[in-house]
């Protein structure tokens, strides 16, 4: 492999952290396509787009092993060393299970540091959700989930523009509204609200920082069937997903006057409550109501006062625009700090209980997330980790991060994807299912929107959680219960038109 650029760019603190031994986190973007993938066309599209990105065409060079310092060095990408397409029987039995096991086997392998830290495995076998699957394995040091989704949009828009010269495929930014005249009473009200908001920001930030520091030292979640212990990052994982109708989520969102993220947090809390109730020995009964099969728990076996918390990732920088990334791919612009791992973590308590009123999960989720939005704890934690890296090296920062993860239970993320179905790398895309390996947790739940679909991706420890599909079932059932509840309460307009 020949180096084409001699200049090196220092790696960010986040990239250095991800390279620390024992903290090698990889992102998997499992992309289902509507057609069989033409390998030659697929590779050519990658060369014209993804492989031009500075991070996807750079080696990560170790500069100081003790302090964990690295730098990026541009190189020539040999696409044949990054894209693999095994010969498969298109009529194989259980293709969905095959794809799941294939992804799990990839999580046991390390990326070759002698080439850019990414690879793609193309599986031309039909599953229940797609006619073919491409598994993107990307080292987390290259970027975070939000940056990667922005890059996907840029790659798709870039090729559409090149195939249709003169046509603009970039999102239209909303125009700024003209400011109205403000009276003295309005000014006084705004000053009071600003003061009160400032007090709440300080208070919630302080509480969150105290909780994180306490967790780092001694405070840990209750031992449950889904709680991992030290070393869980090295145990085998299973990766499963389920595709929902995003319109169902939006229906609940609009009826409850909350955000999509509030609904997803409510789904997570309700789904895990029912899953754990089953794991603790609850029996189930089925009955038919309004022509549909409803599953209800016949008894409540959940222990009292369970402490279960989710670590939620907050993106701390604005997402790079599609236009900027296209200019980067065209080598008209440098990255200039708009790419990388600039992510903060906040701990969110989950109330694990079987509620008689299903919508209580969403109300509680909204209340919790409204408080977390006012907290600056994610920014403070990022600064703290950065200081640890700069003064004590990456090993100290990894030790602190792992101590927090070991004492919590579940990871959670929600990434907004393309609003419309798109053609990516020469083929129509059916869904995107993001997940990760190498994390010090036994369970991670990722939500990814794509067009009118919502994909729930679950990464679970094989030994602790042998039935991750059941988690997907419980999450899906929780959404359906929410939907039925808002309809029955008359919170949905034109409910008569809903199936």
Image: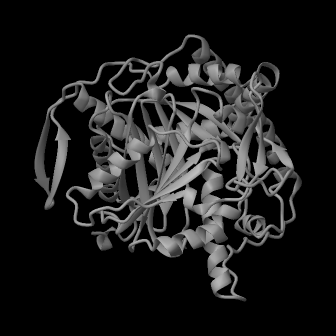
Residue 400 in the figure: left or right of residue 295:
right
Residue at 59% in and 62% down:
79
Residue at 56% in and 37% down:
25
Image location of residue 203, percent across then percent down: 71, 26
Question: Is 135 drawn above or below residue 420 in the view shown?
Answer: above
Quarter of the C terminus within the rendering: bottom left
Residue 336 in the figure: left or right of residue 431:
right
Residue at 42% in and 56% down:
455
Question: Is 73 drawn above or below residue 410 in the view shown?
Answer: below
Looking at this view, is 428 or 348 the one in front? 428
Looking at this view, is 431 or 53 the one in front? 53
Question: Is 70 drawn above or below residue 53 in the view shown?
Answer: above
- Residue 165 visible in the shown view: yes
Residue 277 in the figure: left or right of residue 231:
left
- Residue 258 visible in the shown view: no
Image location of residue 459, percent across then percent down: 41, 40
């Amino acid at each position: 492999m020949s180096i084409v650029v001699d200049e090196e760019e220092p790696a960010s603190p986040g990239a250095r952290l991800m390279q620390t031994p024992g903290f090698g986190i990889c992102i998997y973007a499992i992309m289902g396509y509507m057609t069989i993938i033409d390998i030659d066309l697929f590779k050519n599209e990658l060369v014209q787009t993804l492989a031009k990105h500075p991070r996807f065409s750079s080696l990560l060079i170790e500069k100081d092993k003790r302090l964990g310092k690295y730098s990026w060095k541009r190189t020539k990408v040999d696409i044949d060393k990054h894209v693999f397409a095994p010969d498969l029987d298109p009529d194989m039995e259980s293709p969905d299970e095959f794809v799941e096991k294939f992804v799990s086997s990839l999580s046991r392998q390390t990326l070759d540091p002698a080439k850019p830290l990414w690879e793609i495995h193309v599986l031309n076998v039909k599953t229940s959700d797609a006619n073919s699957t491409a598994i993107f394995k990307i080292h987390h040091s290259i970027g975070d989930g939000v940056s990667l989704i922005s890059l996907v949009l840029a790659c798709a828009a870039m090729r559409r523009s090149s195939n249709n010269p003169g046509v603009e495929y970039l999102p239209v930014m909303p125009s700024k509204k003209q400011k109205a005249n403000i009276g003295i009473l309005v000014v006084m009200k705004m000053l009071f609200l600003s003061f009160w908001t400032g007090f709440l920001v300080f208070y919630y930030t302080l509480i969150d920082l105290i909780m994180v520091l306490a967790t780092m030292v001694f405070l840990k979640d209750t031992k449950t069937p889904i709680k991992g212990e030290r070393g869980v990052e090295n145990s085998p994982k299973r990766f499963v997903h389920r595709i929902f109708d995003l319109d169902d989520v939006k229906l609940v969102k609009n009826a409850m006057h909350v955000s999509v993220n509030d609904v997803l947090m409510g789904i997570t809390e309700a789904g895990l409550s029912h899953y754990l109730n089953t794991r603790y020995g609850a029996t189930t009964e089925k009955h038919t109501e309004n022509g549909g099969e409803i599953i209800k728990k016949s008894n409540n076996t959940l222990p009292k006062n369970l402490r279960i918390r989710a670590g939620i990732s907050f993106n701390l920088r604005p997402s790079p625009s599609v236009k900027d990334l296209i200019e980067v791919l065209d080598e008209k612009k440098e990255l200039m700090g708009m790419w990388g791992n600039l992510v903060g973590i906040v701990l969110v308590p989950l109330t694990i209980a079987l509620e008689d009123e299903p919508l209580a999960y969403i109300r509680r989720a909204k209340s919790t997330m409204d408080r977390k939005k006012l907290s600056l704890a994610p920014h403070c934690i990022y600064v703290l980790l950065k200081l640890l890296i700069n003064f004590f090296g990456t090993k100290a920062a990894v030790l602190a991060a792992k101590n927090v993860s070991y004492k919590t239970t579940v990871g959670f993320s929600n990434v907004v994807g393309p609003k419309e179905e798109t053609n990516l790398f020469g083929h129509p895309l059916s869904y995107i299912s993001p997940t990760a390996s190498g994390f010090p947790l036994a369970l991670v739940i990722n939500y990814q929107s794509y067009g009118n679909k919502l994909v729930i991706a679950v990464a679970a420890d094989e030994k602790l959680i042998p039935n991750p599909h059941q988690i997907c079932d419980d999450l899906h059932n929780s959404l359906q219960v929410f939907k039925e509840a808002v309809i029955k309460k008359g919170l949905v307009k034109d409910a008569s038109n809903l199936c």
